[in-house]
Image (spheres, helix red, strand yellow):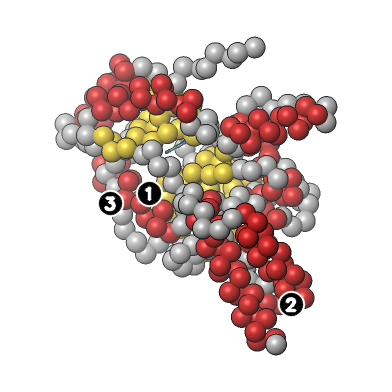
Amino acid sequence: MTLDTQHEIKRLTTLLNDYAYHYYVLDEPKVSDAEYDQLLRRLIELEEKHPEWKQEDSPSERVGGTILEQFQKVQHDIPMLSLSNAFNADDLHDFDRRVKQGLDQEAPTYSCELKIDGLAVTLKYEQGRFVQGATRGDGTIGEDITANLKTIPAIPLRLREAVDIEVRGEAFMPKKSFIRLNEAREKNGEQLFANPRNAAAGSLRQLDPKIAAKRNLDIFIYGIGQLKGRQVSSHHEGLAYAHQLGFKTNPHQQHCETIDQVIAFCEHWLDKRADLPYEIDGIVIKVDALANQEKLGFTAKSPRWATAYKFPAEEVVT
Ligand SMILES: NC(=O)c1cc2c(N)ncc(C(N)=O)c2s1
C-alpha cells in the first residue's frame, strides 16, 4: 500500500503540473476545471496522510504558507534598469540613429514586444527549482515576494530542464479579473483599485499569500537576467529558450528589420490594445543581437539598446 501511495502522489503531482502548464502557460486546456480540481483534492488528501512524500513542486505548494511579518530585502545580482521613453515616430527615428551610430552604422534588427502594464519581477531558479522571486524595487534592492509569486499558476515551480537561471517578467492582473475584483470590493464597501497595475501591485504586496492566491494574477516573462551553461546570441532566441523551459512568454513579439516596421508595429497595437485581455502601456523595442547590446551598453539608468514607445494616456471615461 505505502509504495503505491508514494507512487500515486508522484504520478498525480506530475499529471497536475502538466495540466496546469497546458492550461496557464500554453492556454491549451487538456482537462476540464472539474477534473483538475477533483485530481487536486485527491492529491491533497494523500499528502495530508503522508506529508513526507509531498513533492517540492506539488501544486498544493502554491496556495500560500504562513502570513509574513514583513518582506525581506533582496539585492539584484544584475540591476533591473528602467527604459528610456519614446513618444512619437521622430523619437523612434532618433533612437534608431543613435543605435546605428553606436554600431558604426551597422543596421541592427529589433525585437518589438508589448509593454505589459503590471509589476516588474525577477524569478530565480536553481537546478530548475523556483527558489526566489522579488519585486524590482529601486532596480538594485527589491522585496522577496516568493510566497506570493508561487500562487501564480503560470509561474513554474520546476522547469522542464534543471538549469540555474534568473528571468525577468511582468506580473499583471487580466482586465476581467480586475473588473470582478472591484465589483466584489464595491459590494463590501472597500476602496476600489484605480487600474489593473495597482491591483496587481497591491495583490503582490500582501503579507498573506492566501490573499494573493485569490487575485487571478498572471505573468509574461520577457528577459533572461542570468543564465549558466547555455549561450544564446539574440534576445528572441533567449525568449524562445525561456518558453522551452516552461515559462509563459507573450505571443505578440515581432522581429523588425527596420525602424519603419517598428513604427508600424507600434501604430498597430496603439489601435488594437483594447482587444487584449490585459493592459499594455506601450511597446518595448530592443536591439535583438546580444553582441550589439553589449557594444551599445548602458547609460546610468537605462540600456542604450532598448527604448519604450509610450502610448498616450487613455482618456479616463468618468
Ligand atoms: N523596464 C523594463 O526593462 C521592461 C518593462 C517591460 C514591460 N512592462 N513589459 C514588457 C517588457 C518586455 N517585453 O521587454 C518590458 S522590459
Q: Is residue 74 above or below residue 302?
A: below
> Looking at the image, do the residues carrying marks 1 and 2 touch, with CB atoms under 8 Å apart?
no
Task: Tell me the kind of residue under disc 2.
Answer: His
Q: If the picture is divided into quarters, which one holds ligand 1?
A: top left
Disc 1 residue type? Leu
Identify residue type, mark 3: Ser
Viewer-nearest residue: 246 or 127: 246
Q: Which mark is residue 50?
A: 2
Front residue (pair 85, 7): 7
Q: Residues within 10 Å of mark 1 (few under 14, many from 20)?
A: many
- How many numbered callouts? 3
- Could you say which disc has been placed on residue 233 in the image? 3
Q: Mark 1 or mark 2: which is in front?
A: 2
Where residue 239 is drawn, which disc sits there? 1
Which one is in front in this view, the residue at disc 2 or the one at disc 3? 2
Residue 28: x and y, percent? 48, 52
Q: Is residue 100 left or right of residue 174?
A: left
Who comes first in sequence, dot 3 or dot 1? 3
Q: Nearer the viewer, mark 3 or mark 1?
A: 1
Dot 3 beta carbon under 8 Å from ligand 1: no
Q: State left or right for residue 81 relative to residue 259.
A: right
User: Does label 1 or label 2 sit earlier along the sequence?
Assistant: 2
Quadrant of the drawing holding the N terminus? bottom right
Task: Give the x, y percent position of residue 158.
Answer: 53, 63
Contact, CB < 8 Å: mark 3 with mark 1?
no
Q: Quadrant of residue 13?
A: bottom right
Residue 86 in percent (x, y) is at: 38, 22
Determine whether the residue tagged by mark 1 lies in a helix, strand or loop: helix
Instruction: Please give the name of the residue rendered at 64% of the width and 33% of the height, measured from the top-left corner.
Output: 178
Q: Is residue 129 left or right of residue 37?
A: left
